[in-house]
Amino acid sequence: MIVKKLRLERNWSQEQLAELCGLNVRTIQRVESGNKASIETLNSLASVFEVDVSTLTEEVTVIDKNSEDWKGLPLWFRLSLAGSRSKRSAIVAELAMVLLGFVSWLMIDPNAFITPFIFLFAYVMSWVNRYGDKKKVWS
């Protein structure tokens, strides 16, 4: 959840945030680990961070391509996501290849030379996305 990012941007500890919000530390820990929060908890956090509640509930998964973790990943992986900064766009590319593969297979010719390569590319993209999940590249 974005709560941890907002807290770290302000250089607050979980204890400080809990005190400012009137919540206990365990609640902050649960929220930061991705567990669901009550509307009262979200309202308290939104008030302290001076953001809208919807900001706290949206999950944005973006790759930080300037981090040392990113630079430590294999070159083939970094190149495969060269035009993609978010998990969403990587998944969209994967699904677009699957759809294009089916269109090619049904509309053009199932024996066409390009159709297996489109499906192969979709498979590779799915593998890359799962590798990214495994390595936790999406922040």
Image (tube, helix red, strand yellow):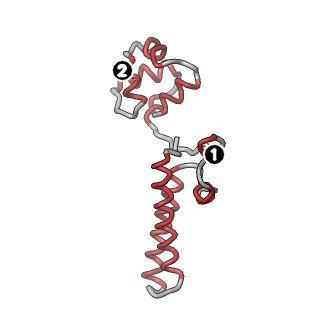
**Dot 1: element:** loop
Identify the mark nearer the N-term, 2 or 1: 2
Residue closest to the far right: 66
Q: Nearer the viewer, residue 130 or 18?
A: 130
The residue wearing badge 1 is 65
Q: CA distance from mark 2 to mark 1?
A: 32 Å
Q: Position of residue 24 (x, y in %)?
A: 37, 15
Residue 71 shown left or right of residue 134 in the figure = right
The correct choice, above or below, for 16 with respect to 125 in the image is above
Quadrant placement of the N terminus: top left
The correct choice, above or below, for 40 with respect to 135 in the image is above
**Dot 2: element:** helix
Which of the 4 image quarters holds residue 11? top right
Q: Position of residue 3 (x, y in %)?
A: 48, 28
The correct choice, above or below, for 26 with respect to 136 in the image is above
Crowding near pointer 2: few (<14 within 10 Å), some, many (20+)?
few
Q: Residue at x 63, y 45 (%)?
A: 65
Mark carried by residue 50? none
Q: Nearer the viewer, residue 118 or 39?
A: 118
The residue wearing badge 2 is 26
Q: Position of residue 39 (x, y in %)?
A: 35, 26
